[in-house]
Amino acid sequence: MSFHNHRNPLLDISEYYLPLDMKEVFHNTNESALEIGFGDGDFLLETARKNSKLNFIGLEIKRSRFQNAVKRAKKEEAENIKFLHMDAKIALDEVFKPSTFSIVYINFPDPWPKDKQKKHRIINNKFLERLSQIMKTNGVLEIASDHRDYINHILEVFKGIGSYKSVYPPPGYTNTLPDRPETKFETEYRTEGRNIYYLAYLNQREIT
Ligand SMILES: C[S@@+](CC[C@H](N)C(=O)[O-])C[C@H]1O[C@@H](n2cnc3c(N)ncnc32)[C@H](O)[C@@H]1O
């Protein structure tokens, strides 16, 4: 007997054995996608709506944003999204099975622009190595940011990791992706006239 609630978009990991088996969470064998730091959830909700044959997990650390997105998902009766209120760094280490995700999105990660703050940036060597483990081989990691210095940092970090291959030729990004749903931060930055950088990497980790 299963006591998991299909209709509830809130993911309560205490109901499952860890690491999570997406077949148990979604009751299907569809491929899975992950968004890290979904903010108000616009992008996640729209992307999930457009891709009804994919299972989506959204991770967000900030309670108010998390709760708003869950409320909206309930109203929209979105069946292919589960929301997890958790620090992504912990979730990557503890919650997901290896080779789980076919696609991962990180949209406008906090840039922590000051020198003293840069150590807080979520995208670093350890994080990407860990992410590579829970992604499927040939899965895609998409990152968007307006912050040129952070983008440079991210490009450098990827250069030091052999298991990812950039989808875009040098310089390793594109500034337009017309069919991509806009995130809330993206809309704000576009209105201000800022350039947006989109990165995409194939996970080429060999399964050992
Ligand atoms: C600049 S906002 C971008 C929000 C959204 N992706 C967008 O583009 O509109 C960065 C988001 O990442 C979330 N975040 C930061 N660190 C996180 C972490 N360790 N785990 C999960 N979410 C995190 C923040 O709470 C915030 O909502």
Image (tube, rainbow, N blue to C red):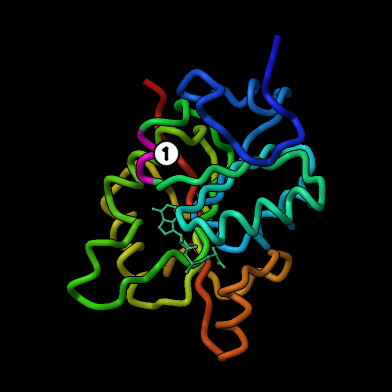
Residue at (64, 27) in percent of width and height: 25
Mark 1, ligand 1, within 8 Å: the answer is yes
* Dot 1 amino acid type: Ala
Residue 173 placement (x, y as % from top left): 49, 67
**Per the image, is 162 magenta?**
no
Name the residue at 18% across, 72% down: 116
Residue 95 point in image, percent of width and height: 44, 31
Helix, strand or loop under label 1: helix
Judge left or right: residue 132 versus residue 167: left
Q: Nearer the viewer, residue 69 or 126?
A: 69
Q: Nearer the viewer, residue 145 or 91?
A: 91
* Observer-nearest of 18 and 131: 18
Asked whether, in this view, residue 8 is left or right of residue 152, the answer is: right
Task: Provide residue 61's location: percent of width, then percent of height.
Answer: 45, 53
The residue wearing badge 1 is: 91
Residue 157: quadrant of the picture: bottom left
Could you tell me which quadrant the C terminus lies in? top left
Q: Please say if 26 is above or below 143.
A: above
Measured from the top left, where is residue 50 in percent x and y? 79, 52
Query: Could you tell me what secondary structure mostly forms the magenta stretch?
Result: helix
Quadrant of the rendered image containing residue 155: bottom left
Would you place residue 44 above or below residue 112 in this image?
above
Work out whether residue 204 or residue 71 is closer to the camera in this orientation and state it: 71
> Which residue range is magenta in the image?
89-93
On the rendered image, what quadrant is the N terminus found in? top right
